[in-house]
Image (cartoon, grey):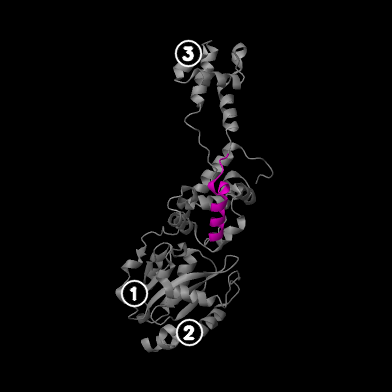
């Protein structure tokens, strides 16, 4: 890969185009023959928000400058050139003087050079509202420290200051001021109070392209049988991956009626690996415990049809960003953090150890079960099997 070479304007445009389209930093680096760190250094100062510049409709365009250049070459007067463009003579006169085309040396004026100089000279960043409104800045920073979201802050300001437009700020402005640190109005440390912990913003298009919400022929949780919803019969499961550091994970399954938990070792998040491991486990269960599986929108279940063929168990998917729809599994994953804290590499744990932890959970009395254990609850629901 290239090392130490500068960035051309065309390369920067291509970088932002690819990032906005959802390509990974690694993928962009491979496409542009750059190291990942170099890509990150281009994105990080802007928080993943592409810097945008727009040409005002009031200024001369490149096409108009080319008309001026042709008029000067034909020895036309400033007034006639201005009349042909529909511009004031003073506008054309200033343009010509500013870019080296004095009357006695008209041949020096070049449209493209003049346009480039004008574009560069126009780089006057507009101060954001939070940087020029100390009282508003202080209020926003204070609410962020209380873990308020930008949307909550914006809505609260409208309620508190209904007649004062100067005390209004949009959620997007707050986000941009946090992520684009060049604005300098909000300290970078306040990013830690946002619910999402990413340091680069992604467009909605890019977030969709990560595979979540794009599972082919996904069956909505709204089509799940009523008996699963009211926990009337056993055999309906909720599942997800519990993530650790260094790309490690384990699959967790929870039976909805009894809250009985199972932990399954999976070496990767690859959909074929996860589906195969889940199918092997489900096939070992008695028939009355094989009714349905509810999963998040993770791409590890992209091949859910293969799972259904192998087990005859349909997979129902939660709505995007709705983890509460598999609340039993979410609660169990929270309990498992006692044994697998966030940031722990869980790839080294054996299946035997995972079974031991699952047994501890299943023999722990639960308030929601009237202080019975998940193991006792499940045993009373199904006949004992080998």
Name the spot of residue 12 as percent of width and height, x first: 58, 41
Whether residue 201 is visible = no
| Label 3 CA crowd tier, 10 Å (few <14, some 14–19, many 20+) | few
Badge nearest the viewer, 3 or 1: 3
Most foreground residue, 118 or 240: 118
Tell whether position 371 is magenta: no
Residue numbers of the magenta segment: 125-143
| Label 2 CA crowd tier, 10 Å (few <14, some 14–19, many 20+) | many
Most foreground residue, 58 or 136: 136
Badge nearest the viewer, 3 or 2: 3
Secondary structure under the numbered disc 2 in the rendered image: helix
**How far apart are the two marked residues, 2 and 1, measured between alpha carbons?**
22 Å
Asked if 260 appears above or below 214 in the picture, the reply is below
Residue on which the image places disc 2? 362
Q: Which mark is residue 111?
A: none
Residue for point 61% across, 37% down: 8
| Label 1 CA crowd tier, 10 Å (few <14, some 14–19, many 20+) | some
Residue on which the image places disc 3? 80
Residue on which the image places disc 1? 229
**How far apart are the two marked residues, 3 and 1, measured between alpha carbons?**
79 Å
């Amino acid at each position: 890969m290239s090392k130490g070479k500068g960035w051309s304007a065309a390369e920067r445009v291509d970088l932002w185009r690819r990032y906005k389209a959802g390509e990974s930093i690694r993928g962009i680096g491979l496409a542009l023959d750059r190291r990942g760190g170099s890509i990150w250094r281009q994105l990080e100062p802007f928080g993943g928000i592409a810097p945008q510049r727009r040409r005002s409709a009031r200024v001369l365009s490149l096409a108009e400058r080319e008309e001026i250049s042709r008029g000067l070459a034909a020895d036309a007067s400033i007034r006639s050139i201005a009349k042909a463009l529909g511009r004031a003579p003073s506008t054309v006169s200033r343009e010509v003087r500013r870019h080296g085309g004095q009357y006695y040396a008209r041949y020096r004026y070049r449209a493209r050079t003049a346009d480039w100089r004008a574009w560069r000279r126009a780089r006057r960043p507009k101060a954001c509202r939070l940087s020029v409104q100390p009282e508003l800045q202080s209020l926003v920073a204070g609410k962020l420290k209380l873990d308020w979201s930008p949307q909550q802050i914006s809505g609260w300001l409208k309620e508190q200051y209904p007649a004062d437009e100067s005390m209004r700020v949009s959620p997007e402005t707050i986000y941009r001021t946090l992520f684009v640190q060049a604005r300098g109005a909000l300290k970078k440390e306040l990013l830690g109070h946002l619910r999402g912990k990413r340091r680069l913003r992604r467009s909605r298009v890019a977030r969709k392209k990560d595979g979540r919400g794009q599972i082919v022929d996904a069956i909505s949780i709204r089509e799940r049988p009523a008996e699963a919803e009211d926990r009337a019969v056993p055999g309906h499961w909720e599942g997800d991956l519990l993530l650790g550091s260094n790309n490690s994970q384990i699959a967790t399954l929870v039976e909805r009626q009894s809250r009985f938990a199972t932990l399954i070792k999976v070496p990767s998040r690859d959909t074929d690996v996860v589906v195969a491991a889940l199918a092997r486990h489900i096939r070992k269960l008695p028939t009355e415990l094989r009714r349905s599986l509810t999963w998040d929108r993770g791409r590890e279940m992209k091949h859910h049809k293969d799972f259904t063929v192998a087990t005859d168990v349909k997979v129902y998917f939660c709505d995007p960003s709705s983890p509460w729809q598999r609340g039993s599994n979410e609660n169990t994953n929270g309990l498992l953090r006692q044994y697998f804290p966030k940031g722990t590499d869980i790839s080294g744990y054996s299946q035997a150890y995972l079974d031991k932890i699952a047994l501890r959970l299943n023999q722990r009395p639960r308030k929601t079960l009237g202080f019975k254990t998940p193991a006792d609850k499940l045993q009373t629901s199904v006949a004992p099997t080998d």
